[in-house]
Image (spheres, rainbow, N blue to C red):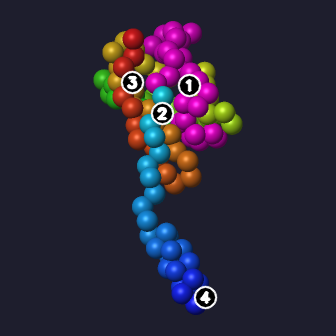
């Protein structure tokens, strides 16, 4: 009986030190034309990110957009969908899209604006 308790305790202790798996990257969003000049609208479908996560979109175009325009964020819905979100961007800009759950950030994807 003692051996059983020791193995349970050891398993629990070692479980705390095991690495957590990274979050999978978001699914590519749908893109449509923005209503303002130099903007697009991005929408992530159900399951594109984890439920209620923070979705981060960073535009790597530093020549066209200033620092205040380069990062956009939104909160995902309970089904993992998000948006529509207006993002400052022009054709061929590269957007880096990821999401955060608690302290864990997902792998990112590069999204090229059409």
The location of residue 67, given as percent across then percent down, is: 41, 33
Q: Determine the residue positioned at 40% across, 37% down.
A: 108
Q: Which residue is mark 3?
A: 111
Q: Is residue 46 a member of the stretch shown in magenta?
A: yes
Number of residues whose C-alpha sits closer than 10 Å to that of mark 3, classed few (under 14), some (14–19) or many (20 or more): some
Upstream in the sequence, badge 1 or badge 3?
1
Number of the label disc, if any, that sits on residue 44:
1
Upstream in the sequence, badge 4 or badge 2?
4
Residues drawn in magenta: 28-55
Q: CA distance from mark 4 to mark 2?
A: 47 Å
Q: Determine the residue positioned at 54% across, 74% down.
A: 12
Helix, strand or loop for disc 4? loop
Q: CA distance from mark 1 to mark 2?
A: 9 Å
Helix, strand or loop for disc 2? loop
Answer above or below: position of 94 versus 103: above
Upstream in the sequence, badge 4 or badge 3?
4
Upstream in the sequence, badge 1 or badge 2?
2
Number of the label disc, if any, that sits on residue 1:
4
Q: Residue furthest toward the right?
A: 78
Upstream in the sequence, badge 4 or badge 1?
4
Q: Is residue 18 visible?
A: yes
Q: Determine the residue positioned at 58% across, 40% down.
A: 50
């Amino acid at each position: 009986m003692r051996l059983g308790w020791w193995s349970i305790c050891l398993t629990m202790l070692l479980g705390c030190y095991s690495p957590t798996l990274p979050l999978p990257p978001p699914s590519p969003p749908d893109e449509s034309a923005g209503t303002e000049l130099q903007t697009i609208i991005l929408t992530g479908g159900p399951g594109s990110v984890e439920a209620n996560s923070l979705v981060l979109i960073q535009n790597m175009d530093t020549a066209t957009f200033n620092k205040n325009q380069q990062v956009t964020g939104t909160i995902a819905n309970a089904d993992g969908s998000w948006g529509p979100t207006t993002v400052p961007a022009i054709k061929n800009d590269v957007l880096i899209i990821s999401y955060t759950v608690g302290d864990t950030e997902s792998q990112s994807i590069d999204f090229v604006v059409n």
